[in-house]
Amino acid sequence: MKDKIRQLEEEARADLVRIDSADAADVFRVAYLGKKGKLTELFKRLGAVPADEKKAVGAELNRVKQWLESAVEGFRQKAPNKGVPDAAFDETLPGIRPPQGSIHLLQQTIREISGIFNRMGFETVEGPEIETEFHNFTALNIPLNHPSRDAFDTFYTTHGQLLRSQTSPVQIRVMKERRPPLKIIAPGRVYRPDTVDASHSFMFHQIEGLMVDDRVTFSDLKGILHLFLRELFGSSTRIRFRPHFFPFTEPSVEVDIQWGKGWLEILGAGNVDPHVFEEVGYDASVVRGLAFGLGVERIAMLRHGINDIRHFYENDLRFLRQFA
Ligand code: DAH
């Protein structure tokens, strides 16, 4: 019954603002307060309301009745003037709340990770998603015929550019523009020739890191990544560095965290390969660097128990609201 009253109030409010003449006010009065009016019908149902609620419901009905009567009276006095008479506008009613959006979980994750690195002195920069072969491959020491291009080669434009397959080309752009010391992170979208399934997508997000100075060592890399992973996954997180290969770092590692009984790969990293420094015109005998790259989706999935990467891109509010 309370819902019905509430509903009637809404309807009446909508009808009231449309009244623009004395006649219309009369039609309104009959529709709500007449013998078979909507409010009158509700009064007739008062008898069926349980005894303990009757008093409250009756009071509600009377309140609405008084409001409608005074509204109609207001229109009568002002008629035939056009416009919305004061009685139709009850300034004591709450306003209509505009729907409010929230930040997407991927963006939240990027902000959180960036925040950790920003506090360690890394500056956030961005690079273009459409890249040249030079920035995406050649300058990163990935030659034309290198097998690792297969996993990355795709989505070329007619001008010989491609959607970047990694955020690593941002390293090249920053180094070509600036001189050391450098400490940057670069979040953004990357593209792969992958068939979409629960754990793969043709587009996903990475965060790249680069630090260049004249005495950056492997232990700096270990220290920074230790701090980062413990900040993100908790201070007792166990971390493992595994030898690996990337064309643009030497030595290279993959970094795992302990997860239950096993280990999970979280990121790739290493000391910047001297060839990369040569490509950007740095003196490779003087500068030293460290670099790392990680996948944002993977981290968000691990931390929130999300089992299908496609959830991130479908804009299903039932998913998104869980992280609002
Ligand atoms: N670009 C690599 C990838 O997409 C990730 C990566 C590994 C970035 C090692 C780095 C790095 O900067 O040092 O798989």
Image (spheres, rainbow, N blue to C red):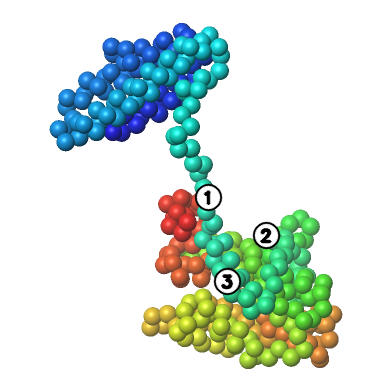
Residue 113 numbered mark, or none: 3
Depth check: give the residue in front, 291 or 149: 291
Q: Is 190 on the left or on the right of 97, as rendered?
A: right
Q: Nearer the viewer, mark 2 or mark 1?
A: 1
The reply to whether the residue tagged 3 has its Cβ within 8 angstroms of ligand 1 is: no
Q: Quadrant of residue 160?
A: bottom right
Instruction: Tell me the distance, in whole angstroms, between the alpha carbons under discs 2 and 1.
Output: 32 Å
Q: Is 68 on the left or on the right of 316, as rendered?
A: left
Callout 2 amino acid: Phe
Q: Quadrant of residue 113?
A: bottom right
Residue 291 drawn at (x, y percent): 67, 80
Depth check: give the residue in front, 76 or 188: 76
Taking 29 as reference, is 302 above or below it? below
Q: Which residue is mark 1?
A: 101
Total labels: the figure holds 3
Q: Are marks 3 and 2 in contact (CB under 8 Å)?
A: no
Callout 1 amino acid: Gly
The reply to whether the residue tagged 1 has its Cβ within 8 angstroms of ligand 1 is: no
Name the N-terminal-most of marks 2 and 1.
1
Residue at image coords 48%, 12%: 77
Q: Secondary structure at mark 3?
A: helix
Name the N-terminal-most of marks 3 and 1.
1
